[in-house]
Image: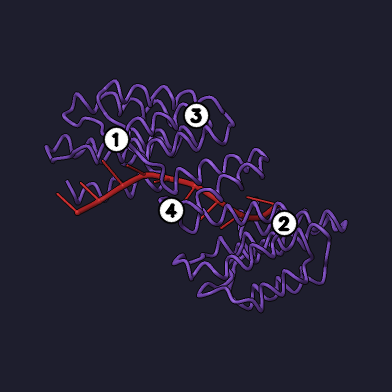
Chain colours: A purple, B red
Amino acid sequence: AYFHNKILWALCKSGQSYNALAFFCYLKKKGIVYNVYSYTALVYGFCLEKIWGEAFYCLSVMGTDGCNPNVITYTVILKFLCDDGKIQEALGLLEKMEKEGCDPDLVTFNIVLRELCHQNMVVEMGELLELIDRKGFAPDPFTNTAWAGGLLKMGKVETAKRFLLNIIMSRDCVIDAAVYNIYFHTLCCEHKSEEALSLVNSLMKVGIKPNNISYNTILKGICEEKNIDEALEFFDRSRWGTNTPDLVSFNTILSAACKEGNTSVVRKLLCRMEYEGFKLNVVSATCLIHYFCKVGKIPECLKLLESMMTNGPNPN
RNA sequence: GCAGUGCUCA
């Protein structure tokens, strides 16, 4: 079953759920063993392709096939429902799994809480937080980033910042780079990228290693608060710890340069990306389309769009 | 032994 599950998961994660289903039926017919992992793979695959009917069908029959869905099976569906904005269905399923005697864990709660926060469903957010506590779970960094990220998304910068400061100052909260990254984001929103910058450089002393997201967040802050030259300077000369700029870093500056129609910087960046072996992706291309429109190079714009339609979204 | 959560670029 272990070996076959690997294959099932590979198929399901690559959008070939019906092939996975065929393979699963073949296993069944041959009398080869399968288990709850196998069904969970199918559920994952059908959710990924948004074939909800098949996903829920798998969920409904697996129990009668000797494979009771467990917390992970339910959580997989919940995650996809939430990512699709179907929060009411998610809340319904959350109740249902409890009724079926399957207790949600903190991962499950974090997923649903995140979507509630992103939809600013304040009442339900409070209720769920209370439920988490009542079930004996303590909020972890995922809980906290879900909460703070939602606040930030709703434009409640000050509230998010206060919340994060509380977490950071607290003795008994686990803090990691992601928690700090949202805090950097709030600082940048308040045009305090300098403060974020000095804080990121002191994180190591607290035993937290900044990642590329930390630096890219601040890089964007510098682009918005100051100018592209300052951003380029940070890009080139600053110490990124053991990290190095990645495609997102390039796209961050490229986006800023495209927005203001800065031809020389756009050119320079494209050369550098080629030289350093970074391939443009769909985000880079979208930036360039904005750029072409901004400077009135409509033929170039259409050419790029056409090439994306025929050659796929990643240009060359 | 095999499966599920957060933070950056349009």
Residue labelled with disc 2: A287
Look at 68% across and 72% down and name the residue there: A234
Task: Report the mark closest to the observer, 1 or 2.
Answer: 1
Looking at the picture, how far across and down is residue A240, in whole percent?
A: 57, 73
Q: CA distance from mark 4 to mark 1?
A: 31 Å
Image: A175 above or below A88: below
Q: CA distance from mark 2 to mark 3?
A: 39 Å
Task: Report the mark closest to the observer, 4 or 3.
Answer: 4
Q: Do labels 1 and 2 touch, CB within 8 Å?
A: no
Mark 1 or mark 2, earlier in chain: 1
Q: Do labels 4 and 3 touch, CB within 8 Å?
A: no
Residue under disc 1 on the same chain as residue under disc 3 = yes
Task: Check disc 1 and report its element: helix, strand or loop.
Answer: helix
Residue labelled with disc 4: A171
Task: Report the mark closest to the observer, 1 or 3.
Answer: 3
Residue A71 is labelled as 1
Task: Report the mark closest to the observer, 2 or 3.
Answer: 3
Task: Check disc 4 and report its element: helix, strand or loop.
Answer: loop
User: Residue furthest toward the right?
Assistant: A296
The foreground one among A72 and A147 is: A147
Looking at the picture, how far across and down is residue A43, in whole percent?
A: 34, 35
Q: Do labels 2 and 3 touch, CB within 8 Å?
A: no
The foreground one among A297 and A82 is: A82
Mark 4 or mark 2, earlier in chain: 4
Image: A241 above or below A225: below
Q: CA distance from mark 4 to mark 2?
A: 43 Å
Task: Check disc 2 and report its element: helix, strand or loop.
Answer: helix
Looking at the rendered structure, the kind of residue marked 4 is Arg
Q: CA distance from mark 1 to mark 3?
A: 23 Å
Looking at the picture, how far across and down is residue A111, in whole percent?
A: 44, 38
Looking at the rendered structure, the kind of residue marked 1 is Val
Looking at the rendered structure, the kind of residue marked 2 is Cys
